[in-house]
């Protein structure tokens, strides 16, 4: 069993890395980031974050395993809905005000077509599929931070400070993600892998496909922002 789990996690990480390495947003943020582009990112990520809560709730609603439900509620929902101090969304709003947006411009942002398309994929994966599929799909978005370069969010925070003249407090949204995503992503995947052998509905191949679908949606989401920023759409 240990070898199977190791091989499955290795395959998951390989799929995530292969797709995430091709995402154009990271080239833009590393080399051409402006406050206008950062603002568009914040607005679209705000739309994504609000939608993400619902997707996690769909997984919880379908999952019969108490340990998995407890983990998701504690780590992925409470920090957004129950704790203002930990809320990723509120820290994102704060970062938006540092690049020239008002809080209302973040709250009321309209989704780009590519953002809507990505959200449709995540909603289908979490609402209309087995809970293991939904959980793997959502865990992918936490795991990508670790798979791509070990501390992607930390690096993104450094880029925003360097390119936009922000300080560490301004980019707390980025800097807090590194440690949290390690726990969120690995914990959610652990729940899937732990319960996978106890049922005959979802296969390892199904889990890997869910990961591939989810990381592809992430690419659609981020590349759509890069295209909007640089006038390619």
Image: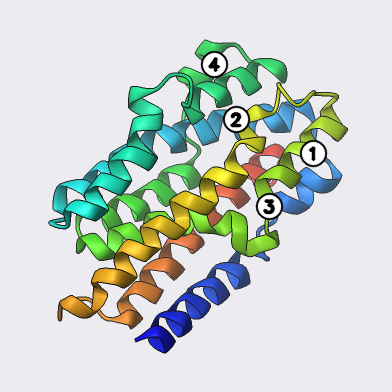
Image: 162 above or below 221: above
**Residue on which disc 1 sits:** 158
- Secondary element at tag 3: loop
**Residue on which disc 2 sits:** 42
Precedes in sequence: disc 1 or disc 3: 3
Mark 3 crowdedness (10 Å alpha carbons): few <14, some 14-19, many ≥20: some
Q: Could one spot residue 213 in this view of the protein?
A: yes
Q: CA distance from mark 1 to mark 3?
A: 11 Å
In the drawing, does residue 20 fall left or right of residue 98? left
Residues at marks 4 and 1 touching, judged by CB atoms closer than 8 Å: no
Q: CA distance from mark 4 to mark 1?
A: 24 Å
Q: Nearer the viewer, residue 141 or 10?
A: 10
Precedes in sequence: disc 4 or disc 1: 4
Q: How far across and how far down the image is residue 38, in percent?
A: 70, 31
**Residue on which disc 4 sits:** 105
Q: Quadrant of residue 16?
A: bottom right
Q: Quadrant of residue 163?
A: top right
Name the mark nearer the viewer: 2 or 4: 2
User: Residue at the location (65% across, 59% down)?
Assistant: 23
Q: How far across and how far down the image is residue 122, in percent?
A: 35, 52
Q: CA distance from mark 2 to mark 4?
A: 10 Å
Q: How far across and how far down the image is residue 230, in percent?
A: 74, 41
**Residue on which disc 3 sits:** 151
């Amino acid at each position: 069993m240990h070898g199977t789990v190791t091989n499955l996690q290795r395959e998951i990480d390989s799929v995530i890395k292969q797709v995430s390495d091709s995402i154009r947003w990271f080239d833009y943020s590393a080399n051409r980031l402006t406050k206008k582009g950062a603002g568009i990112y914040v607005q679209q990520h705000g739309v994504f974050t609000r939608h993400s809560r619902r997707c996690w709730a769909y997984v919880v609603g379908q999952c019969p395993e108490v340990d998995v439900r407890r983990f998701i509620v504690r780590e992925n929902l409470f920090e957004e809905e129950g704790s203002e101090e930990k809320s990723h969304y509120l820290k994102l709003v704060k970062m938006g005000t540092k690049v020239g947006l008002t809080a209302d411009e973040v709250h009321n942002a309209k989704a780009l077509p590519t953002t809507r398309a990505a959200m449709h994929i995540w909603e289908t994966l979490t609402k209309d599929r087995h809970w293991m599929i939904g959980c793997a799909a959502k865990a992918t978005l936490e795991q990508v931070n670790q798979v791509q370069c070990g501390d992607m969010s930390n690096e993104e925070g450094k880029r925003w400070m360097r390119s936009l003249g922000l300080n560490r407090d301004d980019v707390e949204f980025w800097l807090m993600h590194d440690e949290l995503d390690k726990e969120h992503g690995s914990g959610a995947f652990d729940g899937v892998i732990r319960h996978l052998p106890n049922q005959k509905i979802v296969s390892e191949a199904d889990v890997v496909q869910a990961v591939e679908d989810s990381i592809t949606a992430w690419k659609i989401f981020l590349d759509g922002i890069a295209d909007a920023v640089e006038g390619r759409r």
